[in-house]
Amino acid sequence: MDLLRTLCQLAAPAGNEAPMTEFLLNYIAQSQSSWRVQPQVLSGEEFQDCIILIFGKPRTAVFAHMDSIGFTVRYGQELVRIGGPRTETGYRLVGQDSQGTIDCTLTVDEETGELGYEFTRPIERGTELTFFCDFRETETSVQSCYLDNRLGVWNALRLAETLENGIIAFSCWEEHGGGSVAYLAKYIYEHYSVRQALISDITWVTEGVHAGKGVVISLRDSLIPRRSYVDRIRRLAREAGIAHQLEVEGSGGSDAKELQHGAQPWDWCFIGAPEDHVHSPNELVDKRDIDSMLALYQVLMREL
Amino acid sequence: MDLLRTLCQLAAPAGNEAPMTEFLLNYIAQSQSSWRVQPQVLSGEEFQDCIILIFGKPRTAVFAHMDSIGFTVRYGQELVRIGGPRTETGYRLVGQDSQGTIDCTLTVDEETGELGYEFTRPIERGTELTFFCDFRETETSVQSCYLDNRLGVWNALRLAETLENGIIAFSCWEEHGGGSVAYLAKYIYEHYSVRQALISDITWVTEGVHAGKGVVISLRDSLIPRRSYVDRIRRLAREAGIAHQLEVEGSGGSDAKELQHGAQPWDWCFIGAPEDHVHSPNELVDKRDIDSMLALYQVLMREL
Amino acid sequence: MDLLRTLCQLAAPAGNEAPMTEFLLNYIAQSQSSWRVQPQVLSGEEFQDCIILIFGKPRTAVFAHMDSIGFTVRYGQELVRIGGPRTETGYRLVGQDSQGTIDCTLTVDEETGELGYEFTRPIERGTELTFFCDFRETETSVQSCYLDNRLGVWNALRLAETLENGIIAFSCWEEHGGGSVAYLAKYIYEHYSVRQALISDITWVTEGVHAGKGVVISLRDSLIPRRSYVDRIRRLAREAGIAHQLEVEGSGGSDAKELQHGAQPWDWCFIGAPEDHVHSPNELVDKRDIDSMLALYQVLMREL
């Protein structure tokens, strides 16, 4: 889990994913010689801060978003949200401006709900702050900020080790309105005729989805994927005997939103481990769900 | 109206339109020999569950959505909405899961508004339920669930009988966020240079739009179409002497949303009969408005 | 400022931009002989009511929206909004229907908030009304309805006088959900490989942004642009010594929404003068901010 710890500690809020891009490109360059298949690596200005890996003859693409939630310094002591972070007075926030590193405290006005910070000096306007990473691992669980979606990225990197045919796309801005999957999806469809997608992301523990009971196959969130595609995935998961749970939600979204609304006929399905304490510094995932997530991705990328 | 009755009885909620697709492909195969022009039929995985019919040298495309509103079984006895169905305790819902057919009753919690079902057994998670179809026809009206938009589909099929030049596209997911018109619109524009659209769908009886007063030409809903295109349509409707009404709304939407926001310069106009008891099992349309709807589409597809 | 006054007086609410298109095409035809470079002018049905100007070898595109907010006449005396106009009983509204010109008064129901008009006769359903233009210029400021975004259009036209390499795109529907930038952006990217954008539009005076303190470079609104691109712009502004302010907002949007969500990897930044009395008949801008806006666009189009 050292790789996961490193990923969680890297600051890359939506809009400023470049540090994660740099880390991933280095990691891929150093690791891929030991992978079963060496992928073609697509990156650069034409993909902004995204990365696409092409393995063999792809039929299915995995999307994992690199960005995280966080905060932007507004005027005076004010903060505005990047994405939808949980907010509690006392959360430790870190960042950097031209005057140096920042290690400050989140404040939430009890009456107005307005967000602010407490620090020894004013922070420059527009500075991004992210949760301080306190990575906690036990025999059965991992806990940290940003398991959503550094665990989805980790899953994609572990999948890459044995992947023979498929595409892995690392996307940006997922936590804050999206903005990269539309062009990634267009590029992939036009160059590789691939229109099957799996969303490698983290979902919620709820009254119907429990920690430790296996990876979640989402039947719907705010959007509804094409039934026939999800049914194929459910059948493959059952046949492979991989522990999994079915999720049915009326809200929430993912990179799939851009696939659903884009101008290519993508089939998609959200498949990921569930976490507790969503969008807080204390996101908690059961290791059994991480294991079954990776196992299911390995099966699906072979069989779909 | 037997065709309309059959269309209304077919379960095809957003995301699971395949049964309707199969019906339409069969219907088209059996009927088209009697049509004035035999269209090219485009369907298959590249179009998911959508169908495109190409007649002659097209200048204008008609979009009719196949999907309906409904409910998804969540956890325990809970339901979540597909699209925006009206909900009243006692509505009869039908469906199917691996244990057999389902004929149950909708419940609405008076305090929380939460949706559920009452049935003799638990229903499997993720099962889709739709309104039971009680199709009622009189001399002057039809009443049923899902006239929105099986009547728009019916209008397109009747239009097909005499259509010489034009496109008819049957779309998916309209009731739940859209997701197919973007690629249909791109395909049509790129292959046929067509950028004029008519939205064959059903609208609302309101204080300004009355049953029996003619098909509705919508000047706007939540979106505003290009004025010059709508003005041409109004002129053609007046010149043809077809009874029609003008609608002006600040809310509501249709397949036109995806045309408006897509990356092609589509002109569009929503044209459809108005209904009462919208999104309930008792949608009610005046037959005179059905007649003028079809008549106006016939004129516009010739003249636009 | 005669050009700005003329632009502000022209009625062109979202969806009916044609009068502005006609004016701009005439203005460009008459003026471009005195411009440093004569652009290629792209317009016509393939661009609906939009206009694209191509100068030299472009690297960056400026987007300025032509449309304005306003009102549509609904049923009886009712009005519905076009975009998000401020509403106060007594605002003077003008327009035209088949019975002649209209000069009426806005009414806002104190209890329901419903909008209406008072006039000597009924106005035809679907008629568009816009604010009466009372253009007020002093030594230090301009005040009028529709400085948002006729000032952004003016800035683009003044920029055109000396522009050597670049693109200027005049867009439609920005105030009401968008709908043209998606295809403009696709066309520009595919034909010119340009993916850098500047949004020539007007923003808000707030507690952090003050009139007279210089053009605003927006670090974010409801969306977050790519950090590395905005950082380049900030550096160029500092090096050029142009007065400017940094904005950080959690809400608001612009033509950039369509760039962010489109299927091309656009970098974008909103740069514009701030105004007070936003979306009212009395929008107020400091002339120093207009000057620094134009100066910054001139620098950026050279240096980016």
Image (cartoon, coloured by chain):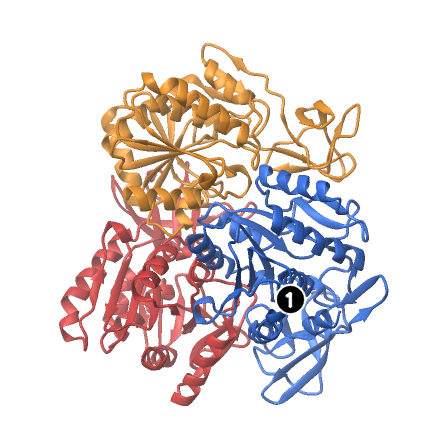
Chain colours: A red, B blue, C orange
Up the image or down, B95 lies above or below C126; here it is below
Q: Is residue B203 visible?
A: no
Name which residue lies at 67% across and 68% down.
Answer: B114
- Say which residue label 1 marks: B69
Give percent across and percent down for residue C238. 26, 29
Relative to C118, C127 lies left or right: left
Relative to B43, A289 lies left or right: left
Q: Is residue B57 visible?
A: yes
Relative to C11, A47 lies left or right: left
Q: Name the residue nearer the viewer: A22 or B181.
A: B181
Type of amino acid at the residue the image marks with label 1: Ile
Which element carries disc 1, helix, strand or loop? loop
Give percent across and percent down for residue B208. 78, 44
Q: Name the residue nearer the viewer: B193 or C96.
A: B193
Q: Name the residue nearer the viewer: B269 or B16.
A: B269
In which quadrant of the rendered image does the N terminus of chain A lie?
Answer: bottom left
Name which residue lies at 50% across and 26% down.
Answer: C22
Up the image or down, C201 lies above or below B155; here it is above
* Quadrant of the rendered image containing residue A195: bottom left
Chain of residue at mark 1:
B
Name which residue lies at 70% across and 74% down.
Answer: B6
